[in-house]
Image (cartoon, grey):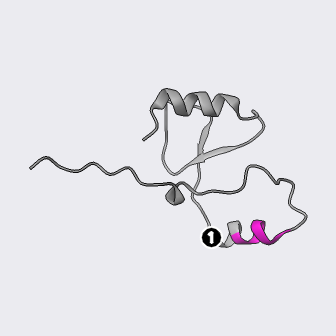
Amino acid sequence: MIAQAEWQEKLDKIDRKMSIFATEKLPQFERAEVRYPSAEVLARLANDSNRKFAQPPLEPMYLHEPHITIPKK
């Protein structure tokens, strides 16, 4: 799991012109805009060879390795 400070450091390195999206309001990350993923739109973008970006590749958060807490017995 990545700590908030680590996320902030990563976000600070991203060009200010690049949008950052989240599915809920995140007051600690003021640049994050609330938006909802659309598989159809992502597929169209991935298939469009004339898209205006190449790096970083689109990577939804749900593809990241999960953080699981095992309850105490």
Which secondary structure class fits the magenta region best?
helix
Q: Quadrant of residue 58?
A: bottom right
Q: Is residue 10 magenta?
A: no
Quadrant placement of the N terminus: top left
Answer with left or right where residue 20 lies relative to residue 2.
Answer: right
Quarter occupied by residue 8: top right
Q: Can residue 27 be seen in this view?
A: yes
Height in image: 65 above or below 40?
Answer: above
First to last magenta residue range: 43-48
Residue found at x 91% / y 64%: 50
Instruction: Give the image location of residue 42, x and y in percent.
Output: 69, 66
Q: Position of residue 30 (x, y in %)?
A: 58, 31
SS state under label 1:
helix
Front in this rendered view, residue 30 or 8:
8
- Residue 29 shows in this picture: no
Is residue 53 positioned above or below 26 on the image? below
For image coordinates 79% across by 72% down, the residue present is 47
Q: Relative to 7, is 64 above or below?
A: below
Horizontal placement of 20 versus 63: left or right?
A: right
Give the number of callouts.
1
Characterize the local packing of mark 1: few (<14), some (14-19) or many (20 or more) Cα atoms within 10 angstroms: few
Rendered residue at 52%/30% (across/down): 6
Q: Where is residue 72 in the image (x, y as percent from the top left)?
A: 13, 46
**Along the viewing direction, whichever of 51 and 54 lies nearer the viewer:** 54
Residue found at the far left of this picture = 73
Amino acid at the residue labelled 1: Ala
Query: To which residue does mark 1 refer?
Result: 39
